[in-house]
Image (cartoon, rainbow, N blue to C red):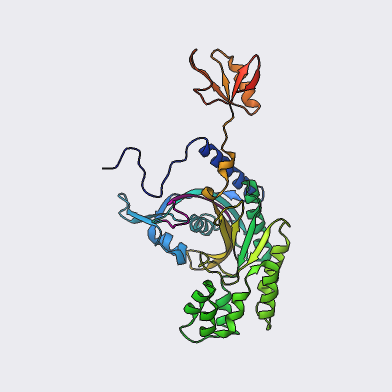
Amino acid sequence: MTKPGLLPEGYHDRLPPQADAAAAVEARVLEAARLHGYERVDPPLAEFADELAARLKAGSLRDAVRFVDPVSQATLAIRPDVTAQVGRIAATRMGHHPRPVRLCYAGSVLSLRAGQLAPARERRQLGAELIGLDTVAAAREVVGVAVEALAAAGVGDPSLDFTLPDLLDTLASGPMPIAAGTLEPLREALDAKDAGRVAAIAPAYLSLVEAAGPFARAMTRLRAFDDGGVLNSRLDGLQAIADALPGHVALTLDPTERHGFEYQSWLGFSLFGGGARRELGRGGTYLVVHPDGCEEPATGFSVYLDTLPAGAAAQRRRLFLPFGTPAEAGVALRGQGWVTVAALAPDDTPEAQLATHLWVAGAPRPL
């Protein structure tokens, strides 16, 4: 037997005023995307497990909660990520729509298990996806919208950490081939920044360990490493994206970072800011699979509501209307933006209604 009111590990209630503040932050993030033409979609919480697994690609269903649908008797999965569902909508229900398609979303996601840095198993995911175009201009727009979304959420001191997810595959299959069976060990060594192990596996790749850090310095080292010019188009595109960002955004580059970017293609980025100890979200370029097997390019980003500074805005501002206050007075005050709490009995008090102001002699007075 569980204790009354006890929730499973990784789940929590969001109470007032934090719930109101979080909803306001969510609305501002979505509004930042809407003003750039991103229209909202709202996919269901669960889908057929096989279909969702195919779209999650590298993520598969290892982090999804599954159950048998009593109606269809099919296995369903509760989404651990909304991005795959947005891709499904774009490829099927909106397959006829002129490209690119700009979509945004907000929805709860559920994980089978949680990590130490992110102990919540249920989270609120917000984001935007641009589907049908694989250009620097498209990526530049999405990165810019992501930065504006952070600003709308009240995140100060934003920073972006760029990565090139397919860099190693591009080099290993072209100008810098490596011995059979060493690609994954090399990938792991580069992820860990283990210079000794990289040198033992493929010494030619050792410079990539040093090509991580502040954006300008990292780009200089990457261009020096790429003496054959194989990466010119990627690096030029990345530079164009960085140049379009406001000067107050701090930029770093880790060209071989792969953790969390398993299904991204040429560009990935992590979002930081507001003094948070962990990333606020991430994004990048990827491929959407159509029912006929064709793949369509896309770029997007996601942030999680629990990482955004909703707590800073969680302050009540409630105006107590004494018993008998004319209804038209409350209408006028609400039209001015006040939250009014009307007394429903003669002995009701501002304190009992958690009011911060009192309506006295035709004017609000702070308590």
Residue positioned 66% across, 27% down in the render: 336
- Quarter of the image with the C terminus is top right
Query: Is 311 situated above or below 126?
Result: above
In the figure, 299 relative to 34: above or below? below
Q: How many numbered badges does the structure rendering display?
A: 0
Q: Name the residue at the bottom extreme.
A: 179
Residue in view at x 68 percent, y 74 percent: 233
* Drawn side of residue 355 relative to residue 363, left or right: left
Is 216 contained in the magenta span? no
Q: Nearer the viewer, residue 119 or 179?
A: 119
Seen from the viewer's position, the closer of residues 214 and 54 is: 214
Residue 294 appears anywhere in the view: yes
Left or right: residue 342 compared with residue 122: right
x and y, in percent, of residue 177 in the image = 55, 85
Question: Where 33 sits versus 53, above or below?
Answer: above
Residue 332: x percent and y percent? Answer: 64, 21
How far across and how far down the image is residue 220, in percent? 70, 74
Residue 142 seen anywhere in this rendered image of the structure: no
Q: Nearer the viewer, residue 88 or 45?
A: 45
Q: x and y percent of residue 345 in the render? A: 48, 14
Taking the spot 60% from the left edge, 77% from the top edge, the residue there is 208
Start-end of magenta stretch: 114-128
Q: Is residue 323 above or below residue 49?
A: above
Q: Residue furthest front?
A: 196
Tell me the quarter of the picture where residue 318 sits: top right
Quadrant of image for the N terminus: top left
